Amino acid sequence: MKLSVNLNKIALIRNSRGSDNPSLIDYAKKCIDLGVDGITLHPRPDHRHATSVDAINISKICKDHNIEFNLEGNPFSLPDGDFMGFHELCVRSLPSQVTLVPDDILQITSDHGWQPGYRDAELKDFISSLKENHLRTSLFIDANSDSVEYAAQMGFDRIEIYTGPFADFLKDEDFVSFNISKDEIAKCIKKARSLNLGINAGHDLNLNNLPHLIESGNVDEVSIGHAIITDALKFGFEDTIIKYIKSVRNYKDED
C-alpha cells in the first residue's frame, strides 16, 4: 500500500492569510524528503484551498523527485476566474493519476461516490482525452459492486473507494454498521481485482481506522489529508508523516 498525502489543508491555511505562508511547495518537499509515495491535490473552482497554479507547480516537483502526483476533481468543472477548468488543468499539469470526483461547488468536502449512469457519454469522452495524454484514471465510488463494475465498463484504470461511512461508524462506535461497511469494502476490493482494476481508498482515514482498512484486502494507495494535518497539531508535522508511513508500510511488510 502506498501513501499519498493530500495538501489541501495546508493551502487552506495559507489562503486564510492571503500570503504564501505556509508554503505548499515547502510542505510537498518535506513530505517527499520523509518518504511518502505521492502528493494529492483537489483544486476546486472557487480556489478555496489548492489552486490551478498549485497543481502545476506540485506536479513538476513530484516529477522532479520521481514520485506520483494525484490530481482530483470534477471532470465537468469549467473555467471560472483563475480556475482554468479541470480538463485544461489535467492537460497542463499532466499528473500521474487523475481521480474523478462528483463534487458540487457548494460541498464542503467530497461526501459520496460517482453515481453509475451520470453523464456517461461526456465521461467517456473525458476518459479518452486523459488516456490520449497517457494519464492513469481513477473513479471515486461508493463501496458497492455496481459502482466497481461501472468503473470497469467505462474504462477506468482504478477506483477510489469512499471510506467516509466506514470511518464514521468506527468513530461513533457503531460496530454493527462498521462491520457491515468493512465487509462491503472487502467485497469491492475482491470485485475490483477480478476486473483488473487498481484500488485506492480515501476520506477520513486516520491512524485508528487504517489497520481495519488493511484487514479488508489489498489496497494499492490511500490518500490522506485532513487527519494528517489535525494529528500534526498534536505530534508535529514530521512525526505525523512518519507515523502514517509506518502504518502503511507495516502492512507492506506483512504481505
Image: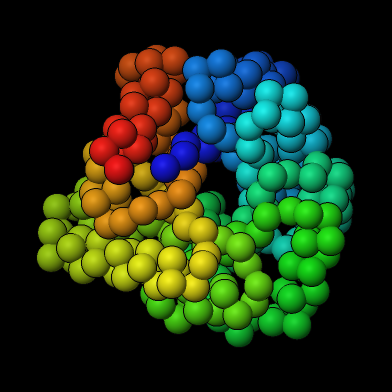
Q: How many marks?
A: 0
Image coordinates of residue 152 in percent, x first then y, are 57, 74
Does residue 34 appear to the left or right of 188 in the view shown?
right
Image quarter (top left, top right, bottom left or bottom right) of the N terminus: top left
At x 43%, y 66%, the residue is 193
At x 63%, y 37%, the residue is 68
Q: Can residue 150 be seen by looking at this rendering?
A: yes
Does residue 247 appear to the left or right of 122 in the view shown?
left
Image coordinates of residue 252 in percent, x first then y, are 35, 38
At x 38%, y 16%, the residue is 239
Image coordinates of residue 61 in percent, x first then y, are 73, 26
Q: Nearer the viewer, residue 29 or 114?
A: 29
Q: Can residue 106 be seen by looking at this rendering?
A: no
Locate residue 43: give its quadrant. Answer: top right
Image coordinates of residue 78 in percent, x first then y, are 82, 61
When the figure is inspected, residue 198 is found, relative to residue 212, above or below; the finding is: below
Does residue 67 appear to the left or right of 226 in the view shown?
right
At x 62%, y 56%, the residue is 99
Does residue 6 appear to the left or right of 100 in the view shown?
left
Q: Nearer the viewer, residue 228 or 193?
A: 193
Locate residue 253: give its quadrant. Answer: top left
Image quarter (top left, top right, bottom left or bottom right) of the C terminus: top left
When the figure is inspected, residue 215 is found, relative to residue 182, above or below; the finding is: above
Q: Nearer the viewer, residue 79 or 6?
A: 6
Locate residue 60: give its quadrant. Answer: top right
The colour scheme used to paint the residues is rainbow
